[in-house]
Amino acid sequence: MNILITGGASGLGEAITRRLAKESTNNVYFTFHKSVTNAEKICADFNNVTSFKCDFKDFQQLTSLIDTINQLDLDVLVNNAYNGYFLTSHFHKISSDHILDDFKDNIIPTIKITQSAINSFRKKKSGKIITILTSALVNVPPIGSSIYVANKAYLEKLTKVWANENIKFNISSNSISPSFMMTNLTADTDERILEQITGSHPLKKMLSVGEVAEAVFFFTRASPHINGVDLVINAGMHLR
Ligand SMILES: NC(=O)c1ccc[n+]([C@@H]2O[C@H](COP(=O)([O-])OP(=O)(O)OC[C@H]3O[C@@H](n4cnc5c(N)ncnc54)[C@H](OP(=O)(O)O)[C@@H]3O)[C@@H](O)[C@H]2O)c1
């Protein structure tokens, strides 16, 4: 299988890249921006992995990445990259320019990359789209997370549109909504908040990136009958 993971050199993306690269029949491609050393290390560790450096905020670089994607004969796209912060500030204090910028930096690249993948999937009448969302969509959204959660909510709806519009071409679209994990995205979280998160967690421990990578692996092999599904990985916290 030819698989592309966006943001595949750090955090959850790195765990996904490494998990999928363990399958020798996979050709794994990943994009990275700042994690140059990690990207080199991953490519040195596996001979079925290729990396592409791209800053999604740079129009030229994104256009050139999409030209490359069009040549890859992809079977699976994993939308994982996120450029921005999990927590910013209270909604009423955020400027509309800030909201628009975050939308442009995150949603537009995901849209362009997914459109390119869908065009190629439709030609071969097969493909899978796996999009990483967040369990904050089903839990109470944390204070200060409005931009992040709203961007993810926009993608959540798109994953359903992709599922509905493309299943007749044997293309499925599913998503995964993980709870809090320790990565660069959450690295600035205050120690006391981390203690609270663990203390109130039903399993008394945080989710690991490896556990989510296993779920991505499952979706890469799943039947297209599994379509339009969001897999929430939060130990059932939203049921409380
Ligand atoms: N951590 C959590 O608690 C949590 C919970 C639920 C969902 N998620 C989701 O999991 C996914 C991965 O996040 P993470 O937690 O692993 O955080 P992360 O380590 O910060 O990952 C973000 C990824 O996006 C890439 N990226 C950022 N800015 C970019 C840009 N301008 N151009 C291209 N790529 C860019 C980064 O690449 P470089 O490192 O190469 O710059 C990185 O690989 C995200 O979709 C996030 O929303 C995370």
Image (cartoon, rainbow, N blue to C red):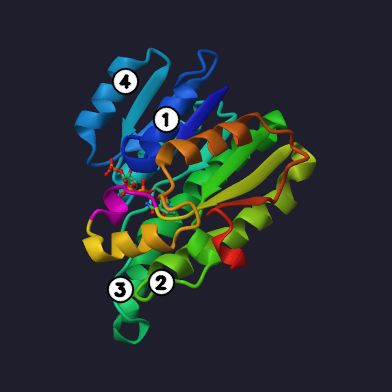
Q: Which label was assigned to residue 17?
A: 1
227 sits to left or right of 9: right
Q: Residues within 10 Å of mark 1 (few under 14, many from 20)?
A: many
First in residue order: circle 3 vs circle 1:
1
The residue sitting at 53% across, 34% down in the picture is: 214
Dot 4: what SS? helix
Which dot, 3 or 1, sits closer to the camera? 1
The span from disc 1 to disc 4 (Cα, nearest Å) is 10 Å
Would you place residue 9 above or below residue 201 in this image?
above
Q: Position of residue 210 (x, y in %)?
A: 44, 36
At label 3, the amino acid type is His
Q: Nearer the viewer, residue 3 or 119?
A: 3
Ligand 1 has an atom within 8 Å of the beta carbon of the residue at disc 3:
no
Q: Which label was assigned to residue 98?
A: 3
The span from disc 3 to disc 4 (Cα, nearest Å) is 35 Å
Q: Which label was assigned to residue 43?
A: 4
The span from disc 2 to disc 3 (Cα, nearest Å) is 19 Å
The residue sitting at 43% across, 63% down in the picture is: 200
The span from disc 3 to disc 1 (Cα, nearest Å) is 31 Å
In the picture of the structure, the residue carrying the numbered disc 2 is: 142
At label 2, the amino acid type is Pro
Q: Which residues are magenta?
A: 181-187
Q: Position of residue 140 (x, y in %)?
A: 50, 72
The span from disc 2 to disc 4 (Cα, nearest Å) is 36 Å
Q: Are marks 3 and 4 in contact (CB under 8 Å)?
A: no
